[in-house]
Image (spheres, helix red, strand yellow):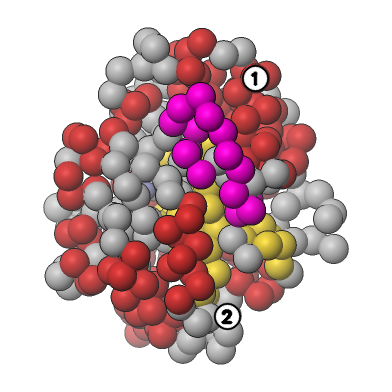
Amino acid sequence: MTFARTLRGDVAPQTLGVVDAHDHLIRVGGGEVYLDPEHQLDSVEKAVEEARRFVSAARNWAPSGGTVVDMCPINCGRDVEKLAEVESQVDGLQVIVATGFHQAKVYLETQSHWVNRYSVDKIAELVIADITEGIDVHDYSGPVVERSPYRAGVIKVGTAYGRITGFERKCIEAAAVAAIETGCPISTHTSAGTCGLEQAELLISLGVPSDQIAIGHIQRNADVWYLTQILKTGVYLELDGTARLKYQPESNRIKELRELGEAGFGDRLLLGTDSGKRSYQKAYGATTGVDYNPAVDGPRMLAEGFDGGYVEQLLMGNAQTFFAFRKES
Ligand SMILES: [Zn+2]
């Protein structure tokens, strides 16, 4: 049986409903919060409110509700117990939790980080244990490891703006080992849409099957020809950054989704919102939030003449395929 690995355990991928492929419900401290306190998402109550809105919009497309993929990786403020509390309070919500790593910048200063001290194989072992045994309740932030019953269902890796640092390359090598061993999908962070092609080529050269990889935040590089070159390697693209008008108009994402669909890549596109700051969530007073894909994107695409089946594929079908492990349970 194929399965997706959620906080509740392994589920049939079709039960995921509407999938928000990259988002943030909980983040308690970590480098991003140090750099900008807006990243602190420590309130279970607010996360429950945000998730309820998402599920309510998701139910317009899938009666069962939806799934949020919380992309907070190792040692970045990940709090799996708080996330489990959120999931248990929201009817119709499933959560997929990440393991893996962010771009080096988020760890502030990396010379003394254990990623620098351990071998690639040792790091891979820790990632694999997050996926197969249970995520450390201390988020691999200290020497004591106590495993929760909650297992990770996606591996994150990230790269800097316009380059892949040595720290990031080591994380990517360990992630590749873990992905091949477990069949767990890999979803990436690109900085402003740079290095997407390099990420895809590197992971594939390390032996990860291309269709087990999604290149993330890639909408920021609204160059459809370039996006097509990445898709030709066989990977998925993940588009988020919804309503981030300081970077680009919404029409860019819609154009990418339309033109990439017309070019025959419609089955390899995933949607998220990446609402990883307080100012991006309705629960903290913003006008947009985690519900954006089913609440705004879907209806807009229909209003702009997209085929209904294609919109459902973008909101649900593609992610249900992507987040299924490449190994039978
Ligand atoms: Zn994010």
Quarter where residue 89 is shown: bottom left
How packed mark 1 is, by other alpha carbons closer than 10 Å (few <14, some 14-19, many 20 or more), is: few
| Residue 122 badge | 1
Q: Is residue 78 magenta?
A: no
Is the Cβ of the residue at disc 2 closer than 8 Å to that at disc 1? no
Q: Is mark 1 within 8 Å of ligand 1?
A: no
Q: Amino acid at mark 2?
A: Gly
Q: Residue 208, percent across and down?
A: 69, 34
Q: Residue at x 15, y 70 (%)?
A: 285
How packed mark 2 is, by other alpha carbons closer than 10 Å (few <14, some 14-19, many 20 or more), is: few
Magenta part of the chain:
137-157
Q: Which residue is mark 2?
A: 309
Would residue 128 be seen by someone viewing this image from the given angle?
A: yes
Q: Amino acid at mark 1?
A: Lys
Residue 150 falls left or right of residue 270:
right
**SS under mark 2:** helix
Q: Residue at x 67, y 37 (%)?
A: 129
Gap between marks 2 and 1, in whole Å?
Answer: 44 Å
